[in-house]
Image (cartoon, rainbow, N blue to C red):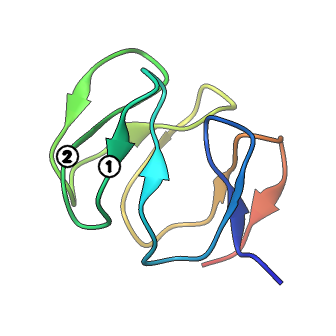
Amino acid sequence: MKDYVDASGAYRNFGEDFIDCNGNWCRWGGGFYDYDGNYIRWGNTYKDSSGAYRRWGEDFIDGAGNWIRV
């Protein structure tokens, strides 16, 4: 079973490449664009799909609205 849904609606495992909110392919551990359109360096606070700000390692809401436990 996949771990979460990325911004494209595709199911991904943690550690796999994923699609960010601007439609870019991103490598796990690299930078990406969050739901506010801000470029986020890996490990910084980001905005998830629910509009909440999260820190890395915290639970979050994925692209399909699912609560994901990390």
The quadrant of the rendering that contains the N terminus is bottom right
Q: Which mark is residue 31?
A: 2
| SS at mark 2 in the image | loop
Can you tell which mark lies on residue 26?
A: 1
Q: Secondary structure at mark 1?
A: strand
Circles 2 and 1 in contact, beta carbons < 8 Å:
yes
| Residue depicted at 41% across the width and 62% down the height | 17
- Residue 44 is marked as none
Which amino acid type is marked by label 1?
Answer: Cys
* Up/down of 50 relative to 31, above or below: above
Tell me where residue 25 appears, x and y as whole percent: 37, 43
Position of 7 with respect to 27 (left or right) is: right
CA distance separating discs 2 and 1: 7 Å
Does 36 appear above or below 7?
A: above
Q: Residue furthest bottom?
A: 1
Image point (48%, 26%), residue name: 21
Q: Amino acid at mark 2?
A: Gly
